[in-house]
Amino acid sequence: MMTMTEQRHVKTEAATPIRALPDAQTVTAVHHYTDDLFSFRVTRPASLRFRSGEFVMIGLMGDNGKPLLRAYSIASPSWDEELQFYSIKVQDGPLTSKLQHIKPGDQVILRPKPVGTLVHDALLPGKRIWFFATGTGIAPYASLLREPETYERFDEVILTHTCRDVAELKFGEELIAETLVDPLVGDEARQKLRYVATTTREKSPLMGRITTLLQDGTLFEKLGITDFGPETDRAMVCGSIGLNNDLKAILEGHGLKEGANSDPGAFVVEKAFVG
Ligand code: A2P
């Protein structure tokens, strides 16, 4: 014979619905920048703590009933009550062909286990920090630029963003404008932050791959920097595999050594999500 309490307990268990989406979060906003780029905001799991620059796995339930997840850098500051992400749209991409259609109120899967190498812990102290980005590789810096530690640790903060076309620079332009008036870091950012935007396929005030501009001296000349090297400079790199490899070689050529969470160094590299 069951007691009344046991009966109630059994009933409650049987009535508990199986959650359709494990780790479900609700979309709160979506902004489309171009036919190929969009950003979205989702609710933040109450328990989620992350270091600026880290990524989490995000996705949707696939047609086969299994979660389809990809690594997405968190683009919002660590104190924000929501989470923001910046994504490419690949029309035949398994995830982004669907994800690009999300609307406020929809649910996405978010595994609340942030990881990544583009974090302050992986860099030794220095005078200048360079945030090198191409395309959606700017996302982790959208968090790091609004992180007070960035300005506590460095005298100069330089964001470079290279895209094919001018319209693709918009996310970065808005980020810089917001950072300069940010209540938390705005004062420091106005003194320390410098922004270099370049395009490679459409005409703009500064054209060329960042690798070329570094190697031919244009970038240093433009910024008035004459002492780039392992004593003063720290860098984070986030773009395509080609960009990452080429920039890594250039930084190593200047004597900078790659770091990791367990062994801080002068620069760190992470692949921007594509697809
Ligand atoms: P480019 O137009 O000369 O290829 P993508 O959309 O292919 O990821 O490229 C984003 C930006 O990164 C483009 O401006 C592209 O320049 C640039 N880029 C791609 N590969 C490299 C690389 N290996 N070194 C420097 N810049 C790169």
Image (cartoon, grey):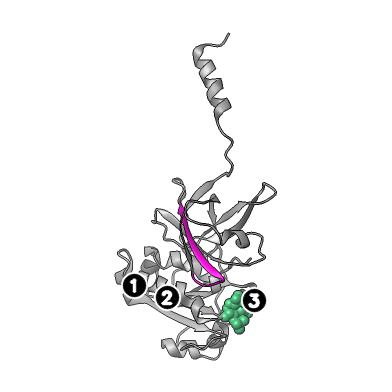
The answer to whether residue 30 shows anywhere in this view is yes
Residue that mark 3 sits on: 242
Whole-angstrom CA distance, mark 2 to mark 3, is: 24 Å
Placement of the C terminus among the 4 image quadrants: bottom right
Q: Nearer the viewer, mark 2 or mark 3?
A: 2
Where on the image, by quarter, is ligand 1? bottom right
Residue density around tag 2, few if under 14, some if 14–19, many if 20 or more, within 10 Å = some
Q: Foreground residue, 113 or 18?
A: 18
Q: Which residues are magenta?
A: 33-43
The answer to whether residue 243 shows anywhere in this view is no
Q: Is 240 positioned to the left or the right of 118 in the image?
A: right
Earlier residue among tags 3 and 1: 1
Q: Is residue 112 above or below residue 209?
A: above
What residue is rendered at 53% in x and 25% in y?
Answer: 12
Q: Is residue 213 above or below residue 85?
A: below
Residue 217 image offset from top left, x and y in percent: 51, 90
Earlier residue among tags 1 and 2: 2
Residue that mark 2 sits on: 173
The residue type indicated by label 3 comes to Gly
Residue that mark 1 sits on: 180
